[in-house]
Structures are given as structure tokens and as C-alpha cells.
Image (cartoon, rainbow, N blue to C red):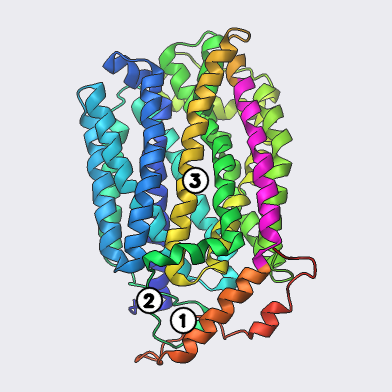
Amino acid sequence: MTRGGSAHRAYSVVVFVVLASLDNVAIGLVPPLYGSIGDAFGVSEAHIALSTTIMFLISAVAAIGFAYAGDRTDRKPVLIAGTLIWIAGTTWSGLAGGYSSFLISQVVAAFGLGAVASVSFAVVSDLISPRRRGLVMSFWGLSQGVGTLAGTLLGGLLGHADWRRPFLVTAVVGGVATVAYLFTYNVPRGDSQPELAGVDYDERIHHDHLPKILRRRTNVWLILQGGTAQIALGSLVWLPVLFRARAEDQGYTAGTAVLVGSVFATLFQLGGALSILGGLVGDRLQRRTPRGRALVASVGVLAAVPFYVVLFFVPMKIDVPDGAGTGAVIGAVLNDVFTEPTVGLCLVFAVFALMLTSANSPNWFALIADVNPPEHRGTVYSLGNLVNGFGRAGGNVMVAVAFRGLAGAFPPPLNYAAGLAAFQLFWVPTGIMFWLASRTVARDMADTHAALLARAARLEVRPDGHVGGDPPVAVEGLAAQQDPGAGR
């Protein structure tokens, strides 16, 4: 495998995608086990849910520092340090002897998780050309969704009998991924940027660049949209609880109900795998108009709302062997999809809802890379991730409060269904902000394109003569794509 060759670059992308998925695995482990961990430590589910909220917040705040360090220095040591920290915290979580110890271990893990996505994003954006950003970023976004699903599934499958086991297994997998990361390609900044082809570009972010970042109006909308989007997504970590409550309402024991909730929640989020379609459509439409990616994301999240609302209220008849082993319960759940019309109908609505909202992530990732120079991307991503973290944490807390408030009028599982449905309305302002971003993106892209060409003209050709991307595109050609009505 030639160093820096196509095979080495492909290997590097795969490793970064895996690393990005593992941080979501670590976060997704806890929700299916709220009850089990709470019982072990003698506290309520709300106390354990607090650890999930803290993880969202701490990882989002830590990501800013890690991203800035990555944009200023060598990114590989920063990413390795963050990975080792979250592995240590996750291992500690599986060994914790009390609630306080568990909570502190989750804080440690969250701090390390802040490095993974933000620094990896900047590296991956340098590995892929603009024409393929939507497609590759769809795999990036998919990896995070798959990570959440894997965490949910691992929590239920490995943790229904022993809640500690999923944490220890995840830590071991993280260690293997860290070793694999040591052999990845150390990507030069701007390596695949057409304007910088063949030049040795090593610009670094500085503390006074934040005003420049925020003057790109598209960045403002891309950062803010995550607040409302993640309130909706944050509420979805309670899906295993909804399906567990439905199983308990139909008379199943706690152990079986936890397993059923995890498997159903995993199945019903498989539509997220179709984010690849959102990335492909975004790439295609982007070639026609610079507004393309933002419009695909806007239409997707707005169209998903009615599917979510219907999903939570369609009744489900669960037919699984109570008290049976893991394999038997999983087999029965899969059989229900084809033999119980209510389960099949719920799955159809879930797939469509997740397919539409998953158009958000690949186009959001690609837009950040489109409108920002390489040395700003990790920091812009982390700022967006900070707003995402507060939104997701807020959604997780607010929906828990809503469940308790609704319980007086609606007994479980109806209170969970009503609360989750109401929180999907937060997709509406998200869709509006993506539409607003579509009106400013053309000019911001043209400005960044012109700035990179100007810098490239002042830089020397790389000693190895390596050309990192597609041929340069004239600024006039990009500006000509702008919609007449697009503006600030």
C-alpha cells in the first residue's frame, strides 16, 4: 500500500469513519440501560439519564478546544489523546462501584469524545474532493447514526443480563481502532481542494479568525440549525424506553421488555442508512446550483415531521417469548415485522422519517467544507457541535420532564408517544434555517474560492509535486452559478 496512494487514503477514510462511529456507540450504550444501572446504584432512571445529558454537553464543549488545537497543530496526536481519554472513561464506567463514580467516569469519557468527531471531520474534509463531498460525508454521517444504533443494540443485547459488559467491550474495540489509526495517512491541509492543487498549503487558524468565520452568513445558519435539530434528535434517545414501556404494558417482564425495546429502537432507526441518498441528491443538485445541498436538507427535515408524528401513535402488537434467550427474542421481533401488520406499518413510517431527516447530516458536513478554508473547518464543525450538544442535551432533559408531566393525563406508554411526537416539531425551525443558508451559500463559496486561489498564487509548489484534487475552477465560473435571488 503506497503511502498517500489511493489505497492508503481509502484505508484512512475507513478508519476515521469507524472512530467517528465509536463515539456515538459510547453515548448510545446508556439509554437502554437507564433502569438496570439505576437499580444497581439505587437511583432513579432520571439520575442515570443525567449522565447522557452531561455527555452531550461536556463532549460538545471539549470539542471546541480539541478542534482549535487540531486546526493549529498536528492533528494526529490530538486525536490519539482524545481517543485514549474516552476509552479510559468508558472502561471506568463499566467498573464503577457507585453512582458518583459512574457519573465522573462518563464526564471523563465525554471529554475525550470531544476530540474524535471534530478533528476527524477536518481530516476527512481534506481527503475528499468537493464533487464527492455529499456522498463521502453521507458515510461519515451514517457512521455516527450506525454508532448510535450499535450502542443501543449493544446496550440491550450485552447489557440486559449484565449492564457493565457493553462498556468494557466498547473500550476494547476503541483500543483496536486506535492502533489502526496509527497507520493512517497524515493528510496535508487542503489536500483535495481544487484551488490548492500542487501547492504546499499550511495555513493555521488564529484566535482572531472567529469574526471572519461568523461573517460568513452561511456559517451562522449552519451552526444555529443544530440547536433545534438536536432537540428533536435528543428526544429520540428515549425510543428504547417507549418500546420497553409498550412491552411492559402488554405484560412482558422487565428483562424481556428491555431487550424488546433495544431491538425495536434499532430496527426503527435503520432508515438513517439512507442518508447516502441525501448525500447523492445533494451532490447532484449542487452541480446545478450552489443552493442545492441546503435545499435538500431543508425539504428533508420538513417533510419528515408528519411521518414521525404518525409513527409514535400507531399501536403495536408485540409477540415474543417472555423470558426467552436473546436469540429467540430477536428472532421473534424480526418475525413480528412480517406477521404483525402494526409492527410492519410502524417500521415503514420510521424508515421514511429517518430517511428524510438523515438528508440533513451529509449536506451539513459538506456545506461546512464548501464555505470554509481548510484551517477553519474543524473549528466551525466544533461550534456547530457545541450548539448541537446543548440542543441534544436540552431535548433529552425537556422530553424527560414532558414525559412526567404527561403521565398524569396519559398513562405509559401513551405519555412517551405524545412527548416524542411533540418534540419532532423542532424540525420546522431547522428546515427554515437551512433554507436561509441556501440564500447565502453561493456568495460565501465564491468568497472562499477566491481567497484560496489568491493564497495558492503566493505559495510554492510541493516538493513531491502531488496534486491533491480536481483542476482549479475559475472564480467567475463559480460565481456564475449563483442564483439571481440569492443574497444576504
Amino acid identity at mark 3: Val
- Residue at the spot 50% in from the left edge and 67% down from the top edge: 212
- Quick check: 296 above or below 39? below
Q: Is residue 92 left or right of residue 462?
A: left
In percent of width and height, residue 414 lies at: 62, 15
Chain-order first, disc 1 or disc 2: 2
Which stretch is magenta? 417-441
Q: Tell me the distance, in whole angstroms, between the alpha carbons under discs 1 and 3.
A: 32 Å
- Residue at the spot 47% in from the left edge and 67% down from the top edge: 125
The residue pinned by badge 2 equals 188
The residue pinned by badge 3 equals 387
Q: Tell me the distance, in whole angstroms, between the alpha carbons under discs 1 and 2.
A: 9 Å
Chain-order first, disc 1 or disc 3: 3
Question: Does 427 appear in magenta?
Answer: yes
The residue pinned by badge 1 equals 468
In percent of width and height, residue 132 lies at: 58, 69
